[in-house]
Image (cartoon, rainbow, N blue to C red):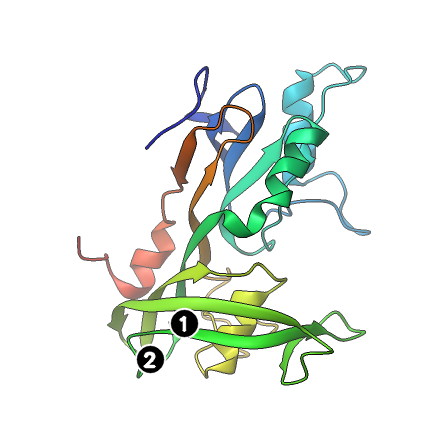
Amino acid sequence: MSKPHNHRSNRRLGDVNVLHEDDHLIIVNKPAGLLTVGTESEKSHTLYALLTDYVRRGNSKSKNRVFIVHRLDRDASGIVIFAKTESVKHQLQDHWDEVKKKYFVVVHGKCTTHHAIIESYLTENKAHRVYSTDDYSKGKLSRTAYKVIKTSGGLSLLEIELLTGRKHQIRVHMADMGHPVVGDKYYGVKEHSHKHLVLHALSIEFIHPVSGVQCKFEAPVPVYFDQLIGKKKE
C-alpha cells in the first residue's frame, strides 16, 4: 500500500494501536468499548482524550491537539482517522464521499442474496434512534453495499462498503433486511451472547490531503470474529 513519507506506525497507546502517524494525520485501530469522543457522562476515557495527551507528550500546557475527522460507535472496533490541524480535517471531510471504507460485520441468519446494495432514506427521531423512511424529504439518501463472505451456525460474515456515511447506517440497514448485527442491543436482537457489537472498520483508502499520495490502511480483525464464525478462507 502507498503511504506518505515520514510516517511512523505500529505504536501502541494502551489498547489502541497506531496504524500510521505523520506530520498531518494519526490513524488508529480503536478497540470495542472505547468512546471516540466524550459524552455528558464520560469525558476522560475516550480515544480523543488519549490521542490529545499523546500529541502533547504529557505537557498539559502544550497547544498541540488532534481533530476528529469521523467517528466510530463505542461498541464497534477498527480504523479511526484524526487530523493534527483543522485545515487537514476539513480537507478530508470535504472529500469524504470519495474515501473508500470497508467493514466486516457478523449478522444473524443466512442472507438469501450473496451481494446487493441496500438503499433508503435515513432519519433520526427525538430519542436519537435512526430509522429508514420512504419520504426523501425527511431523510438522507443512504446506500450500503454488502457481500457474504461466510455463513456458519446461523450467522453470516459480511464485507460492507459504505457508499454513503450516515450515523448507524450499517446497523440500521442490516436490521432492515432482517439480519441485525450480532451484539447490537439497540437495533438488533435482545440477546446477550456477545458483549460487543460485532462490527469492525476494516480498511480505509483515500488521497492524502497534503502529500497527494494514494493511501490505504487496514486494521486486523478482532479474534472474537473467528470465535463466532470461524476463520475466513483466503
Q: Which residue is mark 2?
A: 111
Name the side, left or right, on which 52 lies relative to 61. Answer: left
User: Is residue 59 shown to the viewer in this render?
Assistant: yes
Q: Position of residue 74 (x, y in %)?
A: 60, 53
In which quadrant of the rendered image does the N terminus lie?
top left
Write the residue at 58% across / 24% down. 24
Question: The disc labelled 1 sits on which kind of residue?
Answer: Val
Write the residue at 49% across / 47% down. 99
Q: How many marks?
A: 2
Q: Position of residue 110 (x, y in %)?
A: 31, 80
Label 2: state its secondary structure: loop
Instruction: State if disc 1 and disc 2 touch (CB < 8 Å).
Output: yes
Write the residue at 68% across / 26% down. 85
Question: The disc labelled 2 sits on which kind of residue?
Answer: Cys
User: Is residue 184 shown to the viewer in this render?
Assistant: no
Q: Looking at the rendered structure, which numbered label has been put on residue 107?
A: 1
Q: Position of residue 103 (x, y in %)?
A: 42, 56
User: Between residues 185 and 64, which one lies in front from this camera angle?
Assistant: 64
Name the side, left or right, on which 130 lies relative to 79. Answer: right
User: Between residues 170 and 2, which one lies in front from this camera angle?
Assistant: 2
Tell me the mark number nearer the camera, choosing from 2 and 1: 2
- Considering only vertical position in the picture, is 152 above or below 105? below
User: Between residues 156 and 228, which one lies in front from this camera angle?
Assistant: 156
